[in-house]
Image: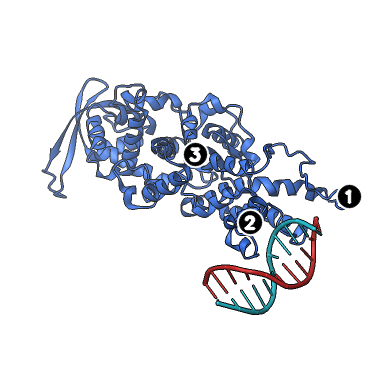
Chain colours: A blue, B cyan, C red
Amino acid sequence: MHTRRLVKRSVIGSRVYAPGLTGDAAPLSGVIQAVKQDNRDASTGHRRNVYTVLMQDGSLKEYSEEEIAQMTAKAPLKSSLKSSCNGGQRDGPTQGQNGGMQRGDLPSLSPESTEEPRVLEHKRTGRALEPEKDHTRSVSLLEQKRKVVSSSIDVPQARRSEEEVDMDKVTAAMVLTSLSTSPLVRSPPVKVSEGLNGSWKDGGFTPSSYSSSGYWSWSAPSDQSNPSTPSPPLSADSFKPFRMPSLSGPPDDNIDEHDGNSLLFDEPIPRKRKNSMKVMFKCLWKNCGKVLSTAAGIQRHIRIVHLGRNCDSECSDGEEDFYYTEIKLNTDSVADGLSGLSPVSPSVLSPPPGLDQRQPDGTNGAKSENSTTTPLSRSAPSALYLVHTDHAYQASPTHNQMQGFGEQRSQTIAVLSSPPRAAGSFSRKSRGEGKKCRKVYGMENRDMWCTACRWKKACQRFVD
DNA sequence: CCTGCCGGGTA
DNA sequence: TACCCGGCAGG
C-alpha cells in the first residue's frame, strides 16, 4: 500500500538510460515523463506499458517497458535504483559509483527519513518483502534481481562483478539492518524473561510474521541469507542456569572486548539496553566468533580482518552484514545470579589468577590450568550458555551461507560445557558444595526445604 | 561432629 | 508415589 504507492509514483520522473539513436554503447539519460498502457501488442496479446521519456537532449521518445527495463538494467545500478527511490530528484548518474555502500546515500531514500527512521524501515522492509506485486516492471525487475542475489549470498570468494552487486548488497544490508534492529526497539517493556519468550513466541515463530510490517519475516525469501535476523527466543531452559545462585557470572570474555569505536556510530544499542538486554554482535566467520558490542564494530572487524579491506566504514559495501549475527544477553538474569553469590562479582575479563578461594592449596599447585579454568567454570559459563544457546538456536535455521558453522557451533558448545564437568570430576563428586536447604533455612524451617532435602535426598533447590 | 545424600523401608 | 530415616562418607 504505502510501498506500492511509493514505488509507483516514483517511476514518473525516474531517470533511465536509453541507448543512443544508433544503439551504441554510450547511453543517454532521460527522465520518464509518462507511462501509458498499450494493448495493441498483437504478437503476444499481453498488456505492456509504454514510457514516454524526456531525453537528455530535450527530445521526447517512447520506449516499451522491455526497453526501459533493459536500459535500466544495463545502466549503472546505483543510479537507476536511486532514481527509482527518490523520484529522480537527484541527478548525477555517476555520483558515488565506486564507493560501495555510502552512508550518505541512505537518507536520500526518502525525504522523511531523517525524522522518521522507523517509517523508513517499514518502507524498506516492505519493499524488499513484496516487490513482485509491483506493476512498474522496470523497478520490480531490479527488485527481483536483488532478491535473487540476496538470497544466495555466498562466501566472499564468489564475488560478482562489484558494480552489479553493489546496490544489491546495500539494499539487502538496509533490510537486514532494519530487520535486526526493529524487534527490540519496538517491543514494549515487559518483564525480561517473559518478554523474551513471549515476544518471541508471539512475534517470531508464529504466522504473525506475515504481519504487514513484516519485520519478523523469517520466511521471506529475501531474508534467507540474513544472519542478523532477530535472535530467536531464549528457551526457558537457557534461563535456568541464571536462576541458580551457584551458577553465575559475567558474560563471555570476548564480549568485553568492546570496540573503541562503539559510540561513534548511530547504533540503537542504548535503547535495547532498556530491557536489560545487552545486544552484542558475533562474528560468524569460522574459527573467529569475535563478539563486539556494536554492529559497526563487528562490521569493521569483519571488513578488516576477514574481508581484508583496509578502508574505513566508508567503503563498506554491506557485505559484512552477512557475516555476523546478533546475540542478546540478559544482564538482569546474570546480575540476578550474581546477587546470590558473593558481593564481589569476579570479572572474567581479567581473570585474577588466584581467584578461586576454594582452591586446595598445595595439593594441586602444579595444576595451573585447573586453577584458571575453575573460576571460569564457576562464573562465566552461565552467561556463555545463554549466548550460545541463543546462538545455536538462531543460527541453525537460516545461516546457510556459513559453511562449517555448525561445526564451529558444536565446538564452542563442547568447550563451554566442559569446564563445569571438569570442575565436578575434579574433586570426584564431592558433596554438594553450595549451601543446601538445611543450611540455608536451618532445621527450624524444615518446611521451607525442598522436598529432596526433607527426604534427605540430593537437594533439588540448590543444585551444584 | 556436621553435613549431604544413598539406599532402603514404610504407609 | 510420598515420605522417612539409618548410616556412610567427606570435610
Q: Nearer the viewer, residue A183 or A284?
A: A183
> What element does badge 2 sit on?
loop
Residue A321 disc label: 3
Q: Amino acid at mark 2?
A: Val
Residue A60 x, y percent position in the rendering? 19, 25
Badge nearest the viewer, 3 or 2: 2
> Counting residues from the N terminus, which is met first, the one under dot 3 or under dot 1?
3
Residue corresponding to mark 2: A463
Residue A210 x, y percent position in the rendering? 31, 48
Q: Quadrant of residue A85?
A: top left
> What element does badge 3 sit on?
helix
- The answer to whether residue A402 of the structure is visible from this angle is no
Q: Nearer the viewer, residue A338 or A96?
A: A338
Q: Amino acid at mark 1?
A: Gly
Other residues around mark 1 within 10 Å, as few (<14) / some (14–19) / many (≥20): few
Q: Amino acid at mark 3?
A: Asp
Residue A318 x, y percent position in the rendering? 48, 35
Write the residue at 64% across / 35% down.
Answer: A257
Badge nearest the viewer, 1 or 2: 2
Q: Chain of mark 1?
A: A
Same chain, marks 3 and 2? yes
Residue A381 x, y percent position in the rendering? 64, 48
Q: Is residue A304 above or below residue A238?
A: above
Q: Nearer the viewer, residue A66 or B10?
A: B10
Q: Chain of mark 2?
A: A
> Counting residues from the N terminus, which is met first, the one under dot 3 or under dot 2?
3
> What element does badge 1 sit on?
loop
* Name of the residue lying farthest toward the top: A58
Q: CA distance from mark 3 to mark 2?
A: 41 Å
- The answer to whether residue A358 of the structure is visible from this angle is yes
Residue corresponding to mark 1: A362
Q: Quadrant of the C terminus of chain A?
A: bottom right
